[in-house]
Image (cartoon, helix red, strand yellow):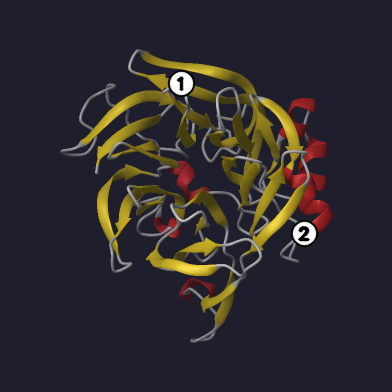
Amino acid sequence: MRTTRLLVTAVTAFAAVLVPVAAEAGGAGQVKIASGLNSPRGLAFAPDGGLYVAEAGTGGAGPCAPGPEGGLVCFGTSGSIMRITDQGQKRVVTGLPSLAAPDGSNAVGPSDVSFQGTGNMYATLGLGGNPTTVRPQLPPAGQQLGWLLRNGKPVTDISGYEVKANPDGGEVDTNPNSVAALPGGEAVADAGGNDLLWVAANGKISTIATFPDRLVDAPPFLGLPPGTKIPMQSVPTSVVRGPDGAFYVGELTGFPFPKGAARVYRVVPGHAPQIYAEGFTNIIDIGFDHGKLYVLEIAHNGLLGADTDPSGALLRVDRHGSPEIVSQSLTLPGGLALKDGKAYVSDCGACPGPAGSVVRIRL
């Protein structure tokens, strides 16, 4: 079974409590700068200086159907992109498709945003399943799920490429989760397809790399004989271009989400991915600041226990390649942006209702 949704269904039981904008949000050096967001995920600064956040939304009134990871999901057009400045916050793109549990949690919709020059805002729309079975159940607006958007309009069907090419050779499954807009095209990490894709300026998609399964210990609750190994998928959730020009990809890992098993890969097109850093748990985003790699974990102690311990963490990779914690005062975070010695994190990215926020963390 592929695990392509960002969270296990147990997390739906969790609800966060909002604190006022600009209130202290978890200790010295961490301040909330925006609140009331609907499942905030990836975020990025634009050339105009604004901080833009992809909001996966809260689903809607339906139609409703069994979700790809079990449970009921309902469709709506509550997905959006918000702009945050010193003057306040405002949604600049609205009406985007969203699938979520009836309480609005665990949404799939707008998942990341990235800019290439002025007037070129790219965003990914997640899907979380096989497009040939998920999309036919949805109204016309839902057909955009799994696409790459430019300035709020669909331009490239990322999930359609998974159906045709299926780069990793496994079950057809797609969840475009991260985009890095660059001169000449966009790199997209497909968490469901276990691959890194390149979208050229003419819209043609090609595969940069795939990320293989690994064998890990079966958790005891499966009741398998001691020592049994089961396959765990990579589930790449983030891509950035590093200071050296290579791509860096962070992985969530699939079931059973073992603690400390997630890796960051360095990818040079034409070569196999190389392990750059490891020892993380359920990576949701990564980024570089002044040459240092920062890693955001959606569940620092593992997704299987996130219903009782939803704490995430921001970590920095030291010069020896080891992770060190910057902040653990986060709840199911969804995205990371870095600027001028500060980290900006979308927090409570899978909570029900408008419980999401953006916090600024001094590095």
Q: Is residue 93 above or below residue 199?
A: above
Q: Residue at image x 59%, y 49%? A: 5
**Residue 361 placement: quadrant:** top left
Q: Which mark is residue 150?
A: none
**x%, y% of residue 231?**
60, 74
Q: Residue at x 36, y 35 (%)?
A: 16
Residue 14's x, y, as percent? 41, 41
On the question of residue 105 being in view, the answer is yes
- The amino acid pointed to by label 2 is Asn
Residue behind mark 1: 48
| Quarter of the image where the C terminus is located | top left
Q: Earlier in the sequence, mark 2 or mark 1?
A: 1
Closer to us: mark 2 or mark 1? Answer: 1
Q: How many marks?
A: 2
Please tell me whether mark 1 sits on a helix, a strand or a loop: loop
In the drawing, what numbered circle is on residue 166?
Answer: 2
Disc 2 to disc 1: CB gap under 8 Å: no
Spatial CA distance of label 2 from label 1 is 38 Å
